[in-house]
Image (cartoon, grey):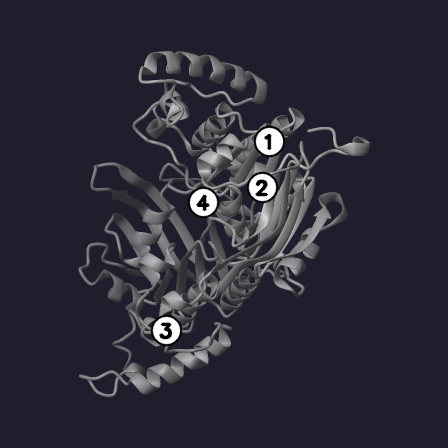
Amino acid sequence: MAGAAGGQRVPAIELRGISKAFGPVQANRDISLTVMPGTIHGIVGENGAGKSTLMSILYGFYKADAGEIRIGGQPNQISDSQAAIRAGIGMVFQHFKLVEPFSVLENVILGVEDGRLLRPSLARARGALKRLAEDYELHVDPDARIEDLGVGMKQRVEILKALYRQADILILDEPTGVLTPAEADHLFRILENLKSQGKTIILITHKLREIMAITDTVSVMRRGQMVATLETAQTSPGELAELMVGRKVLLHMDKKPAAPGRTVLAVENLRVTDIDGVERLRGVSLSVRAGEILGIAGVAGNGQSQLLGVLGGTLRGSGTVRIEGREIDLAARDAGQSRRAAGIAHVPEDRQREGLVMEFLAWENMIFGYHHDPACQRNRALMDNAAIRAMTAERMARFDVRPPDPDLPARSFSGGNQQKIVLAREIERNPALLIVGQPTRGVDIGAIEFIHQRLIALRDAGAAILLVSVELDEILSLSDRIAVMFDGRIMGERRPEETDEKDLGLMMAGMRGKAA
């Protein structure tokens, strides 16, 4: 984008003094941001920092209470998403906005059809998609059904939709959250191609490694304010993390080598078939020993959730599961209670749907599954609420839950603090085996550091830990051994010091990776 006075380039986007409040909560406070054309500009910040609100204002979902938006140097009143599209702005959401039974072509033209007859619109779109695919490495079968595509291909369709609508500015919200490393690398090549063609990219991500790899400039938000904008080449992940949190953050866990002891968990030929008759676990066998963390890597949807469900007692399966040599009845009606009695603690993948009752108070959530504990009972008929509140207050202090108020409902806490409540409930039981799914999903970078430290401390205290995460950085940092799942099977096992993201990524995509 050219040509202001003096030959200076005009910014693609300028936000001047943007403020937005939701009742008493000030989501954005006097934010100014400049994004130059033909660049990839990263925006990072903790949950609640205001990133999504700011981008929603730019894309027309919200109207700012104060401030000005300029596109290409000109003031622009972006009243809704259609106005944003007319201004040349496209947005690729973390959760795709696609109609699953429709074809790629039908999704691309949806909402921008030329008149009442679809055939001319489809024909024009087919030609346009062919040109876009050649220009930007966005090859997708235009006649494929969305429901038959993998997540990487679906993301390409979202980008094609924006480009078909002639977007010059693309906003991508956490675009690699469901991609394998190879798919993420291909996405980065697409973004580089878009940049080379003069497109402007805004990338929202919590993965600092990606910020360092792909962006030209990065802006940091904290508590609704813009605290810094830096040239990416002149900063570091440590500096960005400190700006996000307001203090120094340990990004990689320094842990002593594991000292594995007895076998705590032994799984043999575990199988699960869903209600549609699809086999989700296909003969999984693994073991975890005391004093070690076995990390399970894989793209979401390859059987990890079913593995956690069977071990945690929320799903039934067939095969053999032993805890410290004792076989568990996989068809037991009191599955969850029998798992806890056997020494299994479970931190589920979705804390809000499976780990907490959001309307219940913190102290009530702290005893779910453990309400038969004599320490929680005044007698067999009544709970000792005062004792439970006192116990909850102690655990909230040890786990740095903020605010440390046992009488607040779970919904009043941030995602990171909700996760700490679940972890405190399970870890404080000193389990023989902790199974934990996505321990830091949607969690602030400061809380990530704390959670990682607690998991390592539990390992060092002699517990066996089965860790499921889609974050390869997390798997590599925490695990003593890594198993990779694909299509309901274990593709292979690695030690963190003997592998890398490329090798793990090949196995996550169904290939064997380097020679074992």
Q: Quadrant of the C terminus?
A: top right
Residues under labels 4 and 2: Cα distance? 18 Å
In the image, residue 209 above or below residue 391: above
Tell whether label 3 touches label 2 (CB within 8 Å).
no
Q: Quadrant of the N terminus?
A: top right
Crowd band around label 3 with a 10 angstrom C-alpha radius: few (<14), some (14–19), many (20+): many
In the image, residue 229 above or below residue 312: above
Crowd band around label 2 with a 10 angstrom C-alpha radius: few (<14), some (14–19), many (20+): many
Of badges 4 and 2, the one in the foreground is 4
Residues under labels 4 and 3: Cα distance? 33 Å
- Residue 355: x percent and y percent? 34, 62
Q: Which residue is mark 2?
A: 203
Which three-letter amino acid code belongs to the residue tagged 1? Leu
Crowd band around label 4 with a 10 angstrom C-alpha radius: few (<14), some (14–19), many (20+): some
State the SS at label 1: helix
Tell whether label 2 touches label 1 (CB within 8 Å).
yes
Q: Earlier in the sequence, mark 4 or mark 3?
A: 4
- Residue 81: x percent and y percent? 45, 38
Q: Which residue is mark 1?
A: 191
**Left or right, residue 322 beside residue 510:** left
Which three-letter amino acid code belongs to the residue tagged 3? Ala
Q: Which residue is mark 3?
A: 362
State the SS at label 3: helix
Q: Which residue is mark 4?
A: 61
Residues under labels 1 and 3: Cα distance? 44 Å
Which three-letter amino acid code belongs to the residue tagged 4? Phe
Residues under labels 1 and 2: Cα distance? 10 Å
Of badges 2 and 3, the one in the foreground is 2
